[in-house]
Image: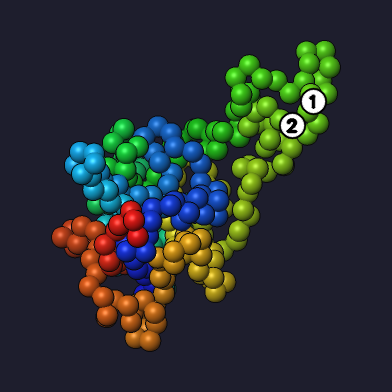
């Protein structure tokens, strides 16, 4: 049976952030707000010591797609909407072992955030320094899930795109607010990646959770997750852990690896090898 997973080589990773940028672009994730990061790919960062004797470390983090996922166990789902005899949980396992969510069955209760060892219902300022993170984010009920592109405030305070009487843009094609950009693009967000595949839509609605899917829409089409493709150091290896001839299986057999919070018993499918060095 297929069990997809990822290995992140910390000796190759230089903390550049390309994986996080690629993830946000691929999955149309929104800006941070109200204690939610909406970063499906994020980082744990730590700096120790006093200059010049300092030590810095970075660990890329994402949903671990745990084999014994507490988020799935805790999800109440929506039995009424699903219908008698049909799967009703909003979180479930795909045949490949990916933990996926069905936005149509999510009721926005946030229980998955509460029980996930790698998530927090509300992030504080410590997350801005990379000390905490949350792999699951919640879109608040009755709020625009893409507020940047509904905002009519000028992107540059005090700046306008036209004169008071003359509504022609001072700079042809120039816009002054997120709402104008979205209106001209005809999509929200304006840089929408309109992918298809799986139960998750490319843009999520309010009152639902969202998280990394290992880019299941790409995997279904024989592609690698966006973070894997974007990594300039080739620090991420993705594949079937149950295939003894796969790169990930051979690597896990050869190298000493660890997983985050293994003591929680969730059996994460994201592994780490090597040691991070900012000079690597």
Q: Quadrant of the image for the C terminus?
A: bottom left
Query: What residue is rendered at 37% in x and 64% in y?
Result: 12
Q: Nearer the viewer, residue 280 or 87?
A: 280
Cβ–Cβ below 8 Å for labels 2 and 1? yes
What element does badge 2 sit on?
Answer: loop
Q: Is residue 147 above or below residue 248?
A: above
Query: What residue is rendered at 46% in x and 56% in y?
Result: 19
Query: What residue is rendered at 23% in x and 44% in y?
Result: 54
**Res 270 visible:** no
Q: Nearer the viewer, residue 161 or 239?
A: 161
Q: Is residue 140 above or below residue 15?
A: above
Q: Quarter-wise, where is residue 60 in the image? A: bottom left
- Local crowd size for mark 1, using a 10 Å CA cut-off: few (<14), some (14–19), many (≥20): some
* Tag count: 2
Q: Position of residue 241 (x, y in %)?
A: 34, 77
Q: Quarter-wise, where is residue 92 in the image? A: bottom left
Q: Quarter-wise, where is residue 93 in the image? A: bottom left
Residue indicated by mark 1: 169
Query: What residue is rendered at 55% in x and 51% in y?
Result: 25
Give left or right: position of 74 versus 143.
left
**Res 259 visible:** yes
Give left or right: position of 184 versus 77.
right
Q: Residue furthest bottom?
A: 245
Q: Residue furthest left?
A: 263
Q: CA distance from mark 2 to mark 1?
A: 6 Å
Q: Position of residue 77 (x, y in %)?
A: 38, 52
Residue indicated by mark 2: 174
Q: Position of residue 69 (x, y in %)?
A: 29, 61
């Amino acid at each position: 049976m297929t069990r997809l997973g990822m290995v992140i080589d910390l000796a190759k990773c230089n903390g550049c952030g390309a994986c996080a940028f690629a993830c946000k672009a691929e999955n149309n994730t929104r800006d941070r707000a109200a204690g939610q990061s909406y970063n499906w790919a994020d980082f744990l960062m730590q700096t120790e010591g006093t200059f010049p004797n300092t030590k810095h470390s970075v660990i890329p983090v994402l949903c671990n797609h745990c084999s014994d996922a507490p988020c799935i166990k805790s999800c109440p789902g929506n039995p009424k909407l699903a219908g008698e005899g049909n799967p009703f949980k909003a979180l479930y396992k795909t045949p490949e072992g990916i933990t996926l969510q069905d936005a149509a069955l999510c009721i926005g209760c946030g229980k998955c955030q509460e029980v996930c060892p790698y998530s927090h219902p509300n992030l504080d300022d410590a997350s801005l320094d990379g000390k905490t993170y949350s792999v699951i984010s919640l879109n608040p009920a009755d709020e625009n899930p893409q507020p940047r592109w509904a905002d009519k405030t000028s992107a540059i305070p005090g700046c306008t795109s036209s004169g008071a009487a003359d509504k022609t843009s001072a700079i042809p094609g120039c816009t002054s607010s997120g709402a104008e950009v979205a209106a001209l693009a005809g999509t929200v967000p304006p840089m929408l990646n309109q992918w298809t595949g799986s139960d998750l839509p490319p843009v999520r609605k309010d009152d639902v959770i969202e998280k990394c899917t290992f880019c299941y829409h790409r995997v279904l089409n024989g592609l690698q997750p966006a973070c894997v493709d974007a990594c300039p150091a080739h620090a991420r290896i993705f594949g079937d852990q149950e295939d003894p001839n796969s790169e990930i299986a051979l690597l896990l057999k050869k190298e000493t690896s660890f997983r985050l919070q293994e003591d929680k018993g969730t059996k994460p499918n994201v592994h780490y090898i090597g040691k991070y060095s900012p000079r690597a």
